[in-house]
Image (cartoon, coloured by chain):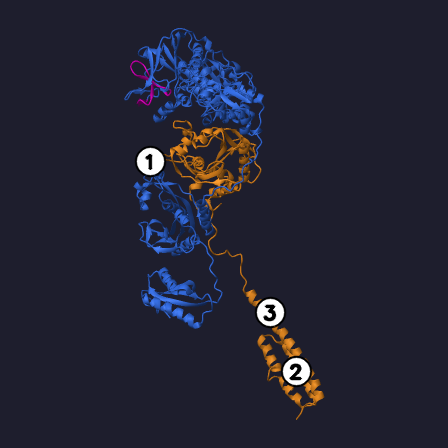
Amino acid sequence: MKFSYNWLRELVEDLDLDARALGLEITMKTAECEAVEPYGQHLERVAAARVLAAEPIPGGHNRKVTVDTGRYGVRTVVCGAPNCRVGMVTAYVPAGTELPDGRIERRVIQGIESDGMLASGAELGINRDAAGILELEANPGDPLPGCVPDQILEIDNKSLTHRPDLWGHLGLAREAAAIVRKRLLDPVRIERLPKGPAPIRVAIEDFDLCPRYSALVFENVTVRPSPLWLQYRLQAVGLNPINNIVDVTNYVMAELAQPLHAFDQDLLHGDTIYVRPAREGERLTALNEETYRLDPAALAIADARGPVALAGVIGGLDTAISARTRRVVLESACFQASSIRKTSARLKLRTDASMRFEKGQDPHNTVRGLARAWELFEQVSPGIRLVGGLADCCRPLSTPPPIELPLDWLTRKLGRAVPEAEVRDILERLCFVVREGGPRVFLVTPPSWRATRDVSIKDDLVEEVGRMIGYGTIAPEPPRVACTVPPQEPLRLFLRAVREAFVSQGFTEVHNYSFYGEDLARRFALDPAEHLAVANPISPEQKLMRRSLVPLIYRNLEENAKHLECFRLFEVGREIHPQPQGLPREIHHAVAAIYSRQEGEGNLYELARVAQCLMPGAEVRPAAPRSFEHPARAGEIWWRGACVGRLFELHPALLAGRAALLDLDLERIHELGPEPKRYRPVRRFPTSAFDLSVIAPQRALIGEIEKLMVRLAGEDLDSIEFLRTYSGPPIPEGHQSVSFRLRVGAADHTLSLDEVGEIRARIIAGLRAAGYDLRL
Amino acid sequence: MPESALTLESALSELEARARERILAAATREELEAVRVEALGRKGTLAQISRQLGSLAAEERARVGRLLNTVKQELEQLLAARQAEFEQRELAARLEAEWLDLTRPAPGPRRGHLHPITQLQYEIEDLFTSLGFAVLDGPEVETEYHNFDALNIPPDHPARDVQDTFWLVNGLLLRTHTSPVQVRGMERFRPPLRMIAPGRVFRNEEVDASHEHTFYQVEGMMIDREVSVAHLIYFMKVLVNHIFQRETEVRLRPGYFPFVEPGFELDLACLVCNGRGCPVCKYSGWVEMLGCGLVHPNVLRTSGIDPEEWMGWAFGLGLTRLAMMRYGLDDIRWFQSGDLRFLRQF
């Protein structure tokens, strides 16, 4: 929202802060002022100039024009504007002036030196008319009437969400006046409104949706461009000047935050304005020339024939003000905030009016808006006359109930004592009514413009006092509270440990998005239908909530493989599994990957090792490969009797190079928990070791052979260590020799050679019985 | 024919002189050993002389015997000394040969890197844990109730605009802030309560250098009998000083968040220009850090906590933006890029 510093100064008596200082005060006490920008600084140099002569320059539409500029003397310029003619008074810009679109230089055009330029309203930032140069009623050398350099305060709209009153200059001026302790100059003279019967009737169907609808009727209206000062002011705050009548409605909106709408009365049917829900199937062609199909959820302003405006959002094209308009119905109403917001959201139509109404406007403001508009109409449309009195349909306006403010409670909330007199002074400066409500208790009534949504409970008053004393005056202080151990989320700690484990093994953590597209899902054998889908995705690639971390890890592999020969990465993130009812299950997984451009069998063993770092004793069991896995290199990770993850190589067709992946269900692993620890007596007697080499078929599982040996060795086994495999002579074709070192011992004595021999013989016999040959 | 004592004595002297000379001259352990065998061995010169002692008279035998022992001891000592010398030299040579270039890069994988946002998150978790706060987790897929309604943002409230929401086909949504974990925290634990909740949040925005639809926040909340703005400022200062590891200057100004009243924006004096004004702080000298405030009584009431009995403060901090500030990052997209060239820098 843009605020004109000049405008604010008209509303605050003797405002002596410059624009920047005011912006800072507003930021610290009211709402965030994002920037203070100069506006129209060039206007100081612009002078009214009479055209003395205009000769066409052959070979174009440009003319050589001589102007009397008063201040700058007689100058010659080249001008291409179609409306340039001898005798007119227009705007002259001397060379060396910075205009919004660039610097004006003296230059030669078609052989003629142009000393400055004649300017249009758009070039000067006064309006958006670029069709021709300005036409003024002024004397040569005069400044442009009402167009002086200004400063624009840009206030962040987000910080005005709760302040309907700050959507107009008077509201911000009121804050400024309260901050600098000056008088607010209210431009509204409501007492001027005549009494008497209204020439039109207003019928409101539901006062919840429209608590108040006020209107005035004017006749003898002349529609023409607004005076320059009005156009300039609207342009400066970002509103588009259109014609005098519409401009006044916008001016009042920008000043009082009260949106107005002007209808051409001669285009309305009947003498009653109906405020009612739209009927199914009704249509309205709006001022933006779009046609909207309405339904009963939208509130319509209608005449005898049908909708003429969408309440609080936009007017209708058919009843709009035009050059032919002679009589005007001026609407100033108040609508229910949520209804306006719904309509505007559904039609995707945000207007200056809807933005204000959805904040909850003050119903007391409607008549003020009309009074102000009438005064301005008289300035911009000479001869205009009010017809009859005010039409004003409303339910009784309620005064907000007073809020009890215990001053000791206020002190506790702020953490700083504020003297009673200061609290009262602050609230009164902000136009709250303060009464005594008992010892150290105030009864505080907010002004109507703060009472619609913003201030209703004592906590809201804490903010009023706090911001005006300045939060910087509150000294930080640690609380005195019970010293207790906070509740823990063990899973969180486990996730930290997992991340740490991967990082210490050389893996770098990535963060991927929580969604992917259907194509990617299918590539990883995931059925799109089993995903939770985003209803309003940014793109089709971000439509499905991930059920697996693998697809996006695959993307990471693809990308990083472009730059790196080999690397390790991992992610700890949530899989989203939809449930028939309620929230989906969010299951924490870790996916780790090792990539190398060359052969990658070592990568798989490395991942298995890392899995065992996390889960001592975890084993890999072969598993049927999925479509995206290397068909001969896929397994499951089992730990403590449960399948907790998967280890596989990515199918080489998916990626240049080799990538081993480990996918762990961290929730499951955490549930299983570590093996309970219990002391077993340390073997105090020396142990003995011997090696065994088993001759097994080439694809026999070494893990199975190891398990068999462990079982056969039984209690006597101290440890077993895999040594190596060997194939080649003398091992028969299609076979391998698998060697282990076993260490055996007894709890109560040193094993004799004979005893060791017996154990060894027992294991060998067992292996033979299981069909394995041995290489002895 | 018995030797005379004199002859034996001179043989001993000669032995000693020769052996001594050869021991000293020995260049290798083998030479030394040869001398030892020749002089002191069982069939060596000394042994031969010793065998002839028997033929001497008792008196002479004793005298020559003593001399013989002296010679033997001296030669043995000399041998041992040279022996030790050789061992010493060999050891030195072996060790010297075992020279290793310790500057050669060590084999094996290097330590990996935690994501910069994870690191920042852990720092904040650790700080608040040390202050007695619980670290809580909440779902990323949320109900409208927890994300909005329970936080005093009813349907059709304009504040919903500020947070463009990803809706899911089943009517749930992706949480737009970590604030719903406040509500879940209050549902799970009764007051007094001190908690933070870091996590991933989502906004339906186009991605560019300064906007992401997926980013990280930390939520914090404290509910107790006496909770004031002064306490809030205290914790915020502790937090900001901890993050930047120095005394920083902060300012609190009004800010609007429906779930707090009063609500604040907390600004940090720009660390790049120390508040003098620069492009980073858009020449204001201040950088927006976080939103905070005293918990709105409606929020407490909705979660079954009596606002007349309990008070609270809460804050929400954008971790992603903070990480950008801390590391001087100019493009937010790096965080979710998965690009190791970026991630390995942290």
Q: How many marks?
A: 3
Chain drawn blue, letter? A
Cβ–Cβ under 8 Å for marks 1 and 3: no
Residue A741 drawn at (x, y percent): 42, 65
Q: Mark 3 lies on which chain?
A: B
**Residue A502 makes an appearance in the image:** yes
Q: Earlier in the sequence, mark 1 or mark 2?
A: 2
The residue that disc 2 covers is: B15
Instruction: Find the distance from the CA under tag 1 to the CA under tag 3.
Output: 84 Å
Q: Chain B is drawn in which colour?
A: orange
Which residues lie in the magenta part? A290-313
Q: Residues within 10 Å of mark 2 (few under 14, many from 20)?
A: many
Instruction: Find the distance from the CA under tag 1 to the CA under tag 2.
Output: 110 Å
Tell me which amino acid carries mark 3: Gln
The residue that disc 1 covers is: B170
Residue A214 drawn at (x, y percent): 39, 13
Give B196 or A159, whichever is nearer the viewer: B196
The residue that disc 3 covers is: B88
Q: Earlier in the sequence, mark 3 or mark 2?
A: 2
Tell me which amino acid carries mark 2: Leu
